[in-house]
Image: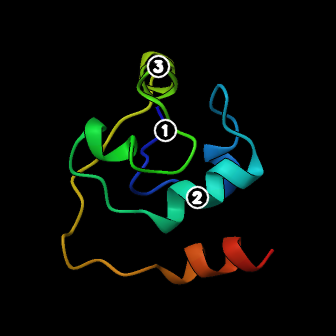
């Protein structure tokens, strides 16, 4: 299972319809408290979000005060 709130870009990119560019977008809009919030990411329609969810993606418990982790920054610079 891939946690949209914690997975690195290379793991997010393995989800259906998500490549490297969309993975970076998912990282930039973290944290997600609900699947509806994922739909606010540019290019993520309700159908696309449903496909990702059905593939086994999860929304782990985010820290509402969480900023980008150092790992996220490294993914975004790659």
Report the disc number at residue 67: none
Q: Secondary structure at mark 3?
A: helix
Name which of mark 2 and mark 3 comes first in the sequence. Answer: 2
For residue 36, above or below residue 7 = above
Q: Quadrant of residue 8?
A: bottom right
Please name the residue that numbered disc 3 is placed on: 47
Residue 75 locus on image (x, y percent): 69, 71
**Residue 24 shows in the view:** yes
Name which of mark 1 and mark 2 comes first in the sequence. Answer: 1
Q: How is the image coloured?
A: rainbow
Q: Secondary structure at mark 2?
A: helix
Report the disc number at residue 2: 1
Residues at marks 3 and 1, CA–CA distance in whole angstroms? 18 Å
Could you tell whether 15 is left or right of 36 in the image?
A: right
**Residue 8 shows in the view:** no
Residues at marks 1 and 2, CA–CA distance in whole angstroms? 16 Å
Query: Label 1 crowding class (10 Å Cα cut-off): few <14, some 14-19, many 20+?
Result: some
Q: Nearer the viewer, mark 3 or mark 1?
A: 3
Q: Quadrant of residue 16?
A: top right
Could you tell whether 43 is left or right of 19 in the image?
A: left
Please name the residue that numbered disc 2 is placed on: 25
Name which of mark 3 and mark 1 comes first in the sequence. Answer: 1
The one of 59 and 25 positioned closer to us in this rendering: 25
Residue at 74% in and 42% down? 19
Residue 59 locus on image (x, y percent): 31, 42
Q: Secondary structure at mark 1?
A: loop
For residue 69, above or below residue 9 = below
Q: Quadrant of the C terminus?
A: bottom right
């Amino acid at each position: 299972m891939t946690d949209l709130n914690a997975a690195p870009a290379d793991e997010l990119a393995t989800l259906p319809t998500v490549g490297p560019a969309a993975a970076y977008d998912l990282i930039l809009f973290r944290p997600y408290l609900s699947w509806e919030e994922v739909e606010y990411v540019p290019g993520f329609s309700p159908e696309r979000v449903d496909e990702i969810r059905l593939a086994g993606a999860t929304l782990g418990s985010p820290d509402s005060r969480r900023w980008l982790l150092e790992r996220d920054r490294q993914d975004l610079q790659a």
